[in-house]
Image: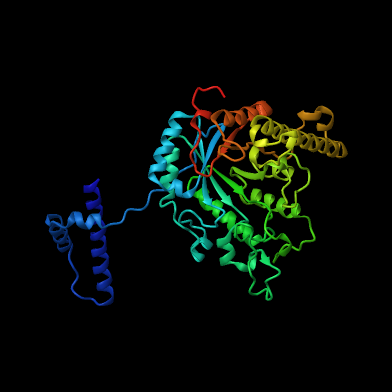
Amino acid sequence: MEFSRARNFLVVLALILVSVTSVSFVFKNPPVMADKDVVAVLDNLVSGNNVQQLADSIPLPPPPPPEKLSNPPEIIKAVYITAYSAGAKTYLNYLKNLFKNTEVNAVVVDIKGSDGYVSYASGAEEVKKYNLTNLAIKNIDELVRFFHDQNVYVIGRIAVFEDPQYAKARPELAVYNKAKTTDLTHPVLWKDNNGLAWLDPNSKDVWDYDVSLAKDALYHGFDEINFDYIRFPTDGNRKNMGFPVFDEKREMSETIKEFFHYLRISLPNEKISADLFGLTTINTDDMGIGQIIEDAFENFDYVSPMVYPSHYANGFRGFANPAEHPYEVVKYSMDSALDREKKMIKKLQDSFLKNSEALGSPAATSQMSFDVPLPILLAKIRPWLQDFNMGAFYTADMVKQQIRATRDSLGDDFNGFMLWNPSNIYTQGAVLKNHPE
């Protein structure tokens, strides 16, 4: 290989010498270097000690970005990892052992966290323009290859509307504080209880920014993009929220549904998933944040309700502390989500039959009920489960109860789960290989 590089260098140099002498002849007509002179120069270079140095100085083109997994797992069993964890060699060694000892076959890696920083040197134009990366992951291609070499499915997480960095860079697109803003050309950013700024969920510029992040990550071999914080804010002084685009007359759910659809048409052939509040499985309204689970079913490959038992109010289903009843809470939530999706399927099929009858289509008489093909593909349900201590100390058995509840509820529709722990250290006993759940 070294010899080849040196020879390539000499060939290129010879061509340069010939070209230079030819151009010189045309424009200045000085004495032209003869072929034998070129050969003499090359012989001198070959005999010199600087050939390898010259060859080594030729920059090699970077390797192409990694491809997606050619044979991704059918049942996803994922863990969430922050960008800083993903960028640490010691943590990657921890993950190696986790993959070896457990059924974990997928990871969810932050592309953009709720702090607004993009985790790697994204090629997205606005990331470069506004310097929005913290470079927590030094080489994104190496990281994706690390996972793919172990046949691990890689999901990139994008926190969408909670984004203090883009809000700072583009304040004209951010939620502003109505009580403190006197000039809309210089808005004072509204902030939630954690002191974080939000973007206007109705802004197409914001939508395009997050789509650009998704497209760049997919270019680097990510197998799926997971969208989080796809809602209006839930806490802070919401009465003081002002929106540069959202007119506050339409329903919040209309805005969020349009955004869901925009993601689908912008990423038509890609795997995408949506994180929703756990209560979306039960509540039929948008809870004042714009999320309705049926709207997500229409537009994503996977819908991922965050059914953490600790996040349900005391008294839910008669439990003084729902966190102490992981099986029951998750089972009820999954049962409700699946029932709502089946009702949605039935409604779509009935509508299809009605339209077919009106058009005189033979499909109306030859096919009935659930045999009727759907005009759209509905999402699979793949929940986030709790593997952290809140409301109760979470043992391996309590994590396993949630997995079992998901499997028992979804049955043949079971498509896996994702575990969340903010510390990124997971309970291996809950997901050991060849271990009953």
- Disc tally is 0
Q: Please report the residue visible at 45 percent of the width from the left and 46 percent of the height from the top.
A: 85
> Does the rendering let one see residue 305?
no
Residue 405 rendering spot, x and y as whole percentages:
65, 28
| Location of residue 171 (image quadrant) | bottom right
Residue 209 rendering spot, x and y as whole percentages:
58, 58
Residue 71 rendering spot, x and y as whole percentages:
51, 33
**What is the quadrant of the N terminus in the image?**
top left
State the scheme by which the image is colored.
rainbow
Q: Residue furthest right?
A: 358
**What is the quadrant of the C terminus in the image?**
top right
Q: Residue furthest bottom?
A: 28
39 relative position to 195: left or right: left
The one of 6 and 389 positioned closer to us in this rendering = 389
| Location of residue 78 (image quadrant) | top right
Q: Please report the residue visible at 59 percent of the width from the left and 37 percent of the height from the top.
A: 386
> Does the rendering let one see residue 312?
yes
The one of 122 and 289 positioned closer to us in this rendering = 289
Residue 254 rendering spot, x and y as whole percentages:
75, 53
Above or below: residue 309 compared with residue 234: above
| Location of residue 295 (image quadrant) | top right
415 relative position to 292: left or right: left
